[in-house]
Amino acid sequence: METVSGFGWLSLIPPAAAILLCFITRRVIISLFIGVFAGGLIYTFGNPLLAVEYSLDKIIGSITDDWNARLLVFNLLMGSGVAFIWRLGGSRALTQRAEKAVKTRKQAGLGAWGLGILVFFNDYVNAAIVGNVFRDIFDKLRISREKLSYILDSTAAPVATFFISDWIAFQIGMIQSGMDAANITEISAFQAYLYSIPLNLYCIIAVLMVGIVIITGRDFNLMRKAEIRTLETGKVVRDGASPMMDVEMELGEEKDTKPKLSTFFLPLAALVAVTLFGFWWTGREGNTLIEVLSNTDPAKALLWGAFAMTITGMGIAFRGRIMKVAEVMGTLLDGMKLMLMACTILVLAWSLGTVTKDLKQAEFIINILGDSLSYDFLPLIIFVMGMVIAFSTGTSWGAMTILTPIAIPLAWHVSGDVYLTVISAGAVFSGAIFGDHCSPISDTTVLASIFSGSDHMDHVSTQIPYAITGAGVAAVLYLLFGIWNLSPAVLIPLGILLSIVLIYIFGKKTEGTGKN
């Protein structure tokens, strides 16, 4: 029976069932639907007919939600943009140029990592750009799609949380709500955000770990197997895999035309330029950069950018008389088809998130904490709670929304210190982004699979060992911070050292032929 805290332990069943089935069956769509339906059964107290109605209502609601609908169309248009780049020879031109500039697998990995850090203004655009730039390069140098998707995912949300992006505006807003709840007026929310950055330890470790893995050439078991497979057989995905986007198979042969780099980069430049313009235009009522970012509509800006990318591809096709009208329209629709499975997964993942909200799962998790805490363990507890909520719901922003207004007053209550209170927000963000980073029902995890062309569950299963390692390192650092109040200037180098040690202990050098 529903209580004040929701459905209690029953609220954990839908996401747990979906995630477990994803790993067991490797069939993401049916696993997610079962999770949604299980939530419907719980919500309707076991009535199967009402559960079906409830499940379908949640799915329709996810599709018609304004933000979600824009993101779905964004994905469809991105598919069309990719299709034009492929058929016009842009991918072939980049691969030919890359053969001259990028000679080794290590250079390719570092290049993707560096570009992922540079494209910091939005996590979705990050995955799209880095994936499109390096997918064919990685294939040529025999680097697995699993490795590319790991790099994309680890430089998307973990990078966007630090730099000028829609993320920091949201995070500042969450900190403000927590400070309001705690009646803290000594500092501004922006100052509090700056204080929290060094304690966003998981994100720092996750981003740096990518570079460590590439430089050392050492991988954990599942990723190492994927890398060896690709090196020795040239198969960038395993036999039987279902890549989220298989451009070559779905789109067939390229047009018989001279490949030009402009065909690749002009559509991407349109995507970036129009998206950045969209950020400014939708938030232009703000007087400062932070106010602009606070007012911006990222979903609308992304949609405009993807539309510009597609229109640019169509313009290249028409201007050079490379395609006729029928071919242009065929390419437009074929590109959208590339994204149908990905869009289906996104809709079901959003639906499952709505179900967990209806069951008040997050509130239940928070309530079991109790109030008998000391600050010694509070940063670690906040981090773990963020991990659990975000991993089970697939949304870091949702986890931040729930946890930040609770964590800041709680930290203020047990510490009475403004600095120790606001810096704890970094632990919230770290835990939330861990879940967003590696949960199979997270939209950014899905997008990393899409733009790398990887099987989704192969991406999740190969990435999780790295994510858990980074989370383990962060957990140790939070414990040290809480007990001894060590400075982040000490904690971060220590975290890097621990990461290197763990990679050397548990990782192995990738064997086989090929350049490292």
Image: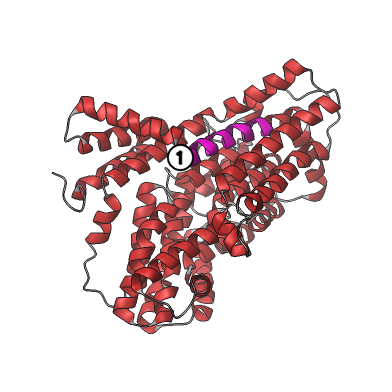
Q: In the image, what residue occupies the spot 72% across and 30% down?
A: 84
Asked if one can make out residue 457 in the rendered structure from this viewpoint, the answer is yes
x and y percentages locating residue 363 in the rendered image: 27, 55
x and y percentages locating residue 260 in the rendered image: 84, 36
| SS class, disc 1 | helix
Identify which amino acid the numbered label 1 is placed on.
Answer: Met
x and y percentages locating residue 383 in the rendered image: 38, 65
Closer-to-camera residue (434/143):
434
x and y percentages locating residue 255 in the rendered image: 78, 23
Q: In the image, what residue occupies the spot 73% across and 51% down?
A: 104
Q: Which residue is mark 1?
A: 457
Closer-to-camera residue (314/496):
314
Q: Main secondary structure of the magenta part?
A: helix
Q: Is residue 271 above or below residue 51?
A: below
Horizontal side of residue 61 vs 208, given as left or right: left
Start-end of magenta stretch: 66-82
